[in-house]
Image: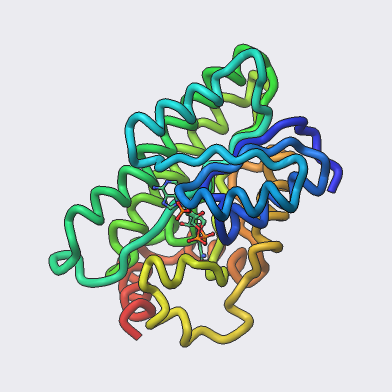
Amino acid sequence: MDLPFATALVTGASSGIGETMAEMLADAGVRTLVVARREDRLADLARHHDLIEPLPADLTDPGDLDRVAARIGDADDPIDLVVNNAGFGTTGEFAELDPDRLATEIDLNVGALTRLSHAALAAMVPRGRGWLLNVSSVASFQPAPRLAVYAATKAYVTSLTESLHEEAGPSDVHVTALCPGLTRTEFQRVSNTEQYADRFPGMAWTTPVEVARAGLEGVVANRAIVVPGLQYQLMAAATSVTPRWLRRKVSGLVQRG
Ligand SMILES: NC(=O)c1ccc[n+]([C@@H]2O[C@H](COP(=O)([O-])OP(=O)(O)OC[C@H]3O[C@@H](n4cnc5c(N)ncnc54)[C@H](OP(=O)(O)O)[C@@H]3O)[C@@H](O)[C@H]2O)c1
């Protein structure tokens, strides 16, 4: 891939979409800092790619989050592309779920993403150069009973990112929300969505390579929202003309099976 970035920082790069994107960036000659909690995974990536540098951090830990935000704001070694990709979900009836886990999910999907988006734009807008890619989900386009907090966090991510896209436009800073559908990663195990995800046919699935590539191409082209895969582009188009009550009913049927 021919990319305009010299440096990048990708959160959630120890597996799945983030790992694939970090490898793609390094293969394209971009020096890439990789953030996640599992240091061994990040070290493995760095062993296989000269241009990958581990930056281990738990983004729900305030001290770690400050450290990563400070790295993004370091004017002596600017980061051209920031990818806020780290995230997870929690499946089940809301009232029966662990409230501490839900709070951590909001801290990561919303709190850390907002803080690092701020660090990125505070550095990029005065420079008049930069790219910010926030990983949301097609779950941001409608409520998702039994995945309620996750869908709400992703609705926040898409809304925030669209606003920032408009704000940053005059500064020539690109801001994009990447909204994947079902993608086979560790997400299904971590978020306990295997129970319904496994029922979907092969054509419903996109690959981490497809998603990562669409995200990078989308932020280079300064698209506000990128939905990888024709099947999900059609779904998103149908969603925009479907009454709200019908969207949440259908979404509830999908999650319950
Ligand atoms: N897979 C899908 O079907 C799908 C669909 C739509 C959207 N998405 C979104 O895509 C993004 C990437 O997910 P994925 O599918 O690639 O899942 P994944 O394989 O589970 O990757 C999640 C990444 O987030 C990192 N992470 C989790 N908690 C963290 C924390 N507290 N601090 C720092 N890093 C943390 C994980 O690393 P450590 O555990 O090492 O910290 C891992 O690298 C997420 O935002 C997800 O919501 C996924």
- Viewport quadrant of the C terminus: bottom left
**Near-viewer residue (121 or 49):** 49
At 72% from the left edge and 55% from the top edge, which residue is drawn? Answer: 213
How far from the left and from the top, in percent, is residue 70? 49, 22
**Near-viewer residue (250 or 6):** 6
At 34% from the left edge and 41% from the top edge, which residue is drawn? Answer: 60
How far from the left and from the top, in percent, is residue 225? 59, 47
Count up the numbered dots.
0
Colouring convention used in this rendered image of the protein:
rainbow
- Apparent side of residue 9 relative to residue 163 in the rendered image (left or right): right
**Near-viewer residue (158 or 70):** 70
253 to 125, vertically: above or below: below
- Apparent side of residue 176 relative to residue 190 in the rendered image (left or right): right
112 to 144, vertically: above or below: above
Report if residue 234 is visible in the image. yes
Quadrant location of residue 183? Answer: bottom right
Report if residue 133 is visible in the image. no
Residue reaching furthest right?
Answer: 2
How far from the left and from the top, in percent, is residue 228? 64, 61
At 60% from the left edge and 18% from the top edge, which residue is drawn? Answer: 125
- Apparent side of residue 1 relative to residue 43 in the rendered image (left or right): right
At 31% from the left edge and 81% from the top edge, which residue is drawn? Answer: 256
How far from the left and from the top, in percent, is residue 11? 53, 44
